[in-house]
Amino acid sequence: MVYATIDPYTEQTITTFPDATEAEVDAALQTAHDTFLEWRNKPIADRVAVLAKAADILEKNRSDYAATLTLEMGKITAEAEAEVDLCVGMLRYYVKHGEALLAPRLIPAQGYGDTDVQLVNDPMGVVFAVEPWNFPYYQVVRITAPQATAGNVVVLKHASNVPQSAARMEQLFLEAGAPKGLLTNLYLPHNLTEHVIASPYVRGVALTGSEKAGSIVASLAAKHLKKSTLELGGADAFIVLDDADVDKAADWAVFGRNWNAGQVCVSSKRLIVADAVYDRFLARYREGASKLVAGDPTDPKTTLAPLSSTGAVEKLKQQVASAVEQGAKVEYLAEVPEQGAFFPPAIVTGITEDNDAFHTEFFGPVAQVYRAKDEDDAVRIANDSPFGLGGSVFSRDIHHAQQVARRLDTGMVAINHPTVVAADIPFGGVKNSGYGHELLDLGLKEFVNQKVVAVADIDGTF
């Protein structure tokens, strides 16, 4: 495979990077393991001190780090800077809470004293992280911050179109005082993926990516008896009930569907609207999306970024064309430049259950819009999906919205907001959206050995 920086706006290849050799991979794994043996024994306060320094460096150099995101995957400057800010918050969350989250848990057990049985959190070793291109820093920090706090180390295989972002993350932790091997970036060819997973040094595998990639990597992890976590695709339902604030819901839908050019696992991809407010909602959404401005992602006036590549544009074109061939209708809402990997914001309506698009994730600024007969019909449409990552419910009655949220078969639901992405809220899905969690204590403990240490009476009975 080719690791290359290709500017999605100019479509020019900036630079390429050679694949790692098997010998280089083995050397990196050995270094990572050696680092783990020392890192695991450091006090948690020393571990999170590195995270604190990394956060300070990111914050101080916010614009510089953001510019690399814009160059490699086309993110508009404001959204690139917001991603840097999200990473800063995530790092500082573990600085503040890491030690308490890893404290031993005292377990009351019959025949033992109050402190005799403890559940302790031991780090496991090297975690192999396979990450995607749509949030090149956030995805890396999301796995590295909790795992470094826990005492593990990370070997990274990043997406092939963000090689400079991957290298910057490795360098960030080194500059923050981390030992070499705490976070190791490898330009790993596909044919060496199993070689890494099979290494006795690798104790866990974390992947964020497509269903296909997740299936392959999870199978390899299972083959070699390694724990894995997967964060895969999503087709988040954005349910608007008949008592919702329709105008505000539509405005949030414009944002939720089109931020990061719609290239977000938790984008509001399926807008499911109660019949009573459907026409008003659609008109408001159409008006808002029509105002999106596509252009140079470094221009402050630009509000719609290019897609990550021309290949992504072609895939989306084929998906929309297929939906139309099967009876759906498409409406394009704004003009986009001929230069760059742009796709115009669009609405697709009339998608029936026998249309392939009904169960397809559109990774770009294309909104599927469904008219629901009533609340039960909205929930039915939402749950009739192979995905179960996030979702939204809009209603003026918060208590009722929470009840509807409980009916949705997803890992996350936001009330009156697109699916929430925050440093201090856990992240994870169900069904084809994967398994396992990121962030907070849930992500922190995915790759620790929760070990029982029990102090028994030497003269007691068994």
Image: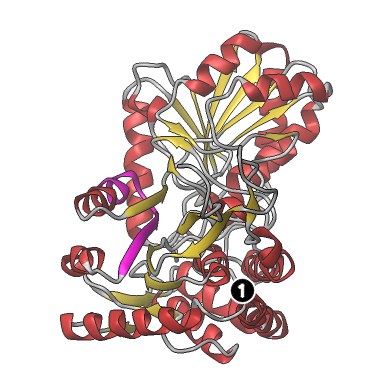
The residue lying toward the viewer, choosing from 248 and 264, is 264
Q: Position of residue 403 (x, y in %)?
A: 71, 19
Which residue is under mark 1? 298
* Label 1 Cα neighbours within 10 Å, binned few <14 / some 14-19 / many ≥20: some
The residue shown at (56%, 81%) is 42
The residue shown at (29%, 79%) is 29
How is colour applied across the structure in the image? Answer: secondary structure
The residue shown at (72%, 11%) is 276
In magenta segment, residue 204? yes
128 displayed left or right of 63: left
20 displayed left or right of 93: left
How many tags in the picture? 1
315 displayed left or right of 176: left
Q: Is residue 20 visible?
A: no
In magenta segment, residue 188? no
Q: Quadrant where the N terminus lies?
A: bottom left
Placement of 5 over or under 246, stated as above or below: below
Placement of 322 over or under 264, stated as above or below: above
Q: Is residue 319 visible?
A: yes
Residue lying furthest front: 459
The residue shown at (41%, 80%) is 37
Identify residue type, mark 1: Thr
Placement of 344 over or under 79, stated as above or below: above
Q: Position of residue 23 (x, y in %)?
A: 17, 85
Q: Magenta region: which residues?
A: 202-215
